[in-house]
Amino acid sequence: MSPETLATIGVLCFGGEDWWYHNRGHCDMQLMRCYARFAPVLYVNSVVMRKPNVREGAMFWRRVRRKLRSIRRGLVRVDDNFRVYSPLTAPVHHLPGARTLNALALQTQMRLAIRRAGLRKPLIWVNCPAACETALALPHRALVYQRTDRYEDYPGVDRDQISRYDRQLKAAADLTFYSSRSLFEQERETCRQAAYVEHGVDLDRFSSADQDPQVPPELAHVPHPIAGFFGGIDRHTFDLDLASEVVARLPGVSFVFVGNASVDCTPLARHAHVHMIGQRPYEQIPHYGKCFDVCLMPWNQNEWIQACNPIKLKEYLALGKPVVSTPFPELAQYDGLVRTATTAEQFVEAIRSFLASPPTDLAARARERVAAHSWRAKALQILEMLPA
């Protein structure tokens, strides 16, 4: 499919996140921003997928309030070619009868939103598998399934039903693309058409951050060396126990965590040399990251992480920073740029090693490794794989 064709039909994207309260560095959001430079885009905030669990207490009610605020916004034009819509859906994918009514309600809302956005038979893009039934029912020129996360492993979802959605989408999509080579190799034969497409990076924003001397005010008086992390601190991805032990063993290092936390971070925050910054606008993130002496990725060792390819890895490398991470398959491509550690002791040793003897050419090599991976390049690569 050519950019000219896309410009005439537009894109309807069922996103995996909410535009209004998630970090806008996610793959679907970045790619939609690229397409919106020349085609109309309607980004649909994530369809509710998790089963309600009031036992989560304050976090549960926080998510409910956040989602209701998003729904109240309705259809919003955020740029000339970019609209965001928050439909009303219910977390009933585990209830067959209610699931059918929920899908019909979503289809009705989407037909109205599509008409208001001026789309007819757009390219439909699905990141959130819970939108499966609606996506398949709507008229479309082509269908893309973004299989960059194993949503069936997401906490609180009906694993069997999300897996069924996943199989339906892989069978119907004109293209299912993966950012994890291992997951691509496992599943490619189950797809109508599959491709491996590495995540991109906002090169201009991250690689040029250090040219701006301004430092975020929260870090102005934080002593170096700084070991830092930006992104969500979530139970299914972030190893809080590991991070807490590493922090406790390195009292002479300042630890900075920038991002929203959906878990109790008291084990981290109780240390005087830890600075919990909270979520900041995406546009500001490179200016926090440029202050780090070492970047961290203390991930859980689970199925979700084994099938991931974190965008923040390329963002860290575009900043020219050394990285210490727990292992996952995609890191094999970054040998010599990232040091891996499975235990707190190994993590501490890797941080100390980078701080004691920072490789003089690492920044140049890291930036060179990601130089060809702009989001625009990825957006055009995917278009080339679609039928004309």
Image (cartoon, rainbow, N blue to C red):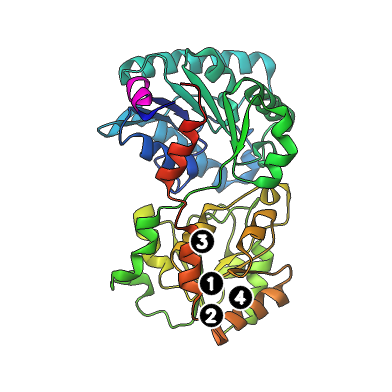
What's the magenta region?
4-9
- Is 258 placed above or below 197 here? below
Q: CA distance from mark 1 to mark 3?
A: 13 Å
Q: Earlier in the sequence, mark 3 or mark 4?
A: 4
Q: Nearer the viewer, residue 98 or 353?
A: 353
Q: Which residue is mark 1?
A: 322
- Which numbered mark, 1 or 3, is in the foreground of this view? 3
Cβ atoms under marks 2 and 3 closer than 8 Å:
no
Q: Earlier in the sequence, mark 1 or mark 2?
A: 1
Q: Which residue is mark 4?
A: 247
Q: Is residue 375 left or right of residue 193?
A: left
Q: Nearer the viewer, residue 315 or 93?
A: 315
Cβ atoms under marks 3 and 4 closer than 8 Å:
no
**Dominant secondary structure (helix, strand or loop) of the stretch shown in magenta:** helix
Element on which disc 4 rests: helix
Residue 184 point in image, percent of width and height: 68, 40
Q: Nearer the viewer, residue 100 or 23?
A: 23
**Identity, as a three-letter code, of the amino acid under mark 4:** Val
**Identity, as a three-letter code, of the amino acid under mark 2:** Pro
Q: CA distance from mark 2 to mark 3?
A: 15 Å
Q: Earlier in the sequence, mark 1 or mark 3?
A: 1
Q: Which residue is mark 2?
A: 359
| Identity of the residue drawn at 49% across and 55% down | 260
Cβ atoms under marks 1 and 2 closer than 8 Å:
yes
Q: Which residue is mark 3?
A: 369
Neighbour tally class for label 1: few under 14, some 14-19, many 20 plus, Cα within 10 Å? many
